[in-house]
Amino acid sequence: MFTIMETTTKLIAVLPKRRRQRENKTTQSPLPKKLNQRLVNLPSFYPASPFPSPTAPMLLKNISRLVLLALVFTTWPSASHAFKMTVPYSVPWVAVIDDFDITDPNNEEELEFLIQECFQRCPVIIFRKKNISDDRTPTAKQFFAFVKRFDPDVDLDAIEKQDILHPYPREPDEPHVGKRTGEVNLELRGRVHSGPLWRMNLVGSKKTSIPNVVSAFQVLDVPEEGGQTIFACMDTAYAMLPPALKKKVDELQCVFDNDMNSLFDSKCDSDGFTRLGPFPEEADEDQVIRPLVHRDKTTRRKRIFFAPKRFNRFVGWSREESWELMAYIFHTFVNTASNSVCIKWEKGDVVVFNNHKMIHKSTPWELYRGKHRMIRICFLNSKKMVEDDEFSHTEPCVTSEISLYDALC
């Protein structure tokens, strides 16, 4: 590890000075004057993030690429198949691992290394079977056993009690894994957000005050068109906020809707983020209040938790001002060229991602009409789901009754 860091430091040190200066320049849209005044008047009770201002996105990309480049493996003596790890996309937080057989118990040492070293740096990991035969395709039980390894705070008691977080038809050999096909979409898309939609799984749900940490899916079949997913990093988005804006958004409490009319009939703009309505009446019994900013109790790092389909407004704000601010944050800091990536899936892909760090958007169903699409999905139970959030004004709660609408919205 020391060798890796020393090598990385030397490589970064020789980056051309002008290039470093150019990459450190970031362009931000100015905050609308009305919102700026609104934020100035908002009192601040919480300290700013304890982390320094981040390195420019392009330099972060270069640093991460160099660190992970030193971790690329072509062979492992104890592995049944040689595998390699690369960072092939335009962002530094997506890693692709080719030919790692997740069904092979002899790969235990390598898997532990990948979880400890790679998943901390790359919250999205794609296991791609380039040269692994189809007869090594993981079963639902093997897939779930593999996913459980990625959360050190996995809630084994909740798993044993069959607290199922996903809403899909359960796999016979592993109920914590659901299967989603084009037919599910075909039944529901007449009412459920037929266009693109950004989401963080279970954020804003009545069922849990803090969402699951690890989400994963296994691609069993892919459509001829569509089927790709866009990811954006909420950790980076928060880190890139100006210091004054960070202090203010730390105070914001979100009102999230959970009534069926909102979850079924509410529409989003073409960006898949801005909710157009309809909205329920004030003080609806299905509404919950959750903080916009969450601080991880392990890493102490802050991040944004947001669910566009459920979001109504901020407490004490008008709906118009609330959405104007969130649209500004989303388009200026979240969905940017340096902070988002579109991934086209291949049959056999196993994808594990940190749901606390990532917001994602799937291809609209209309682009592939529900044909030739089949994936296994897992929302992993975590002890973090029952932790009290230091920014929250509400009590933590959790239940196993997760509805289909919770997962889709």
Image: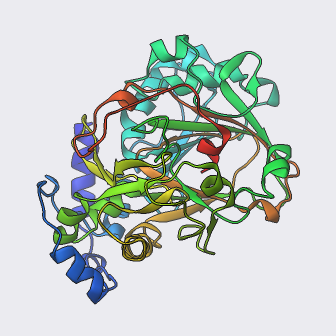
- Tell me how many marks there are: 0
- Indicate whether 203 appears above or below 35: above
| Left or right: 279 as drawn, with respect to 312 | right
Q: Nearer the viewer, residue 16 or 170?
A: 170
Q: In which quarter of the image is residue 393?
A: top left
Q: Is residue 21 visible?
A: no
Q: Is residue 208 above or below residue 162?
A: below
Q: Where is residue 354 in the image (x, y as percent from the top left)?
A: 45, 42
Q: In which quarter of the image is the N terminus?
A: top left
Colour mapping used in the image: rainbow
- Which residue occupies the foreground of this view, 292 or 215? 292
Residue occupying image coordinates x 58% and y 49%: 259
Classify 276 as above or below 399.
below
Q: Residue 223 appears at what percent x and percent y?
A: 83, 53
| Residue 321 seen in render | yes
The location of residue 95, given as percent across then percent down, is 50, 48
* Vertical relation: 227 (above or below) 377: below
Quarter of image, res 26: bottom left
Q: Nearer the viewer, residue 251 or 332?
A: 251
Q: Would residue 132 appear left or right of 243 to someone viewing this image?
A: right
Q: What residue is drawn where x is 34% and y is 59%? A: 236
At a point 20% along the width and 65% down the height, the residue shown is 248
Residue 267: x percent and y percent? 64, 67
Q: Nearer the viewer, residue 380 or 309?
A: 309
90 relative to 251 in the view: left or right: right
**Which residue reaches farthest bottom?**
33
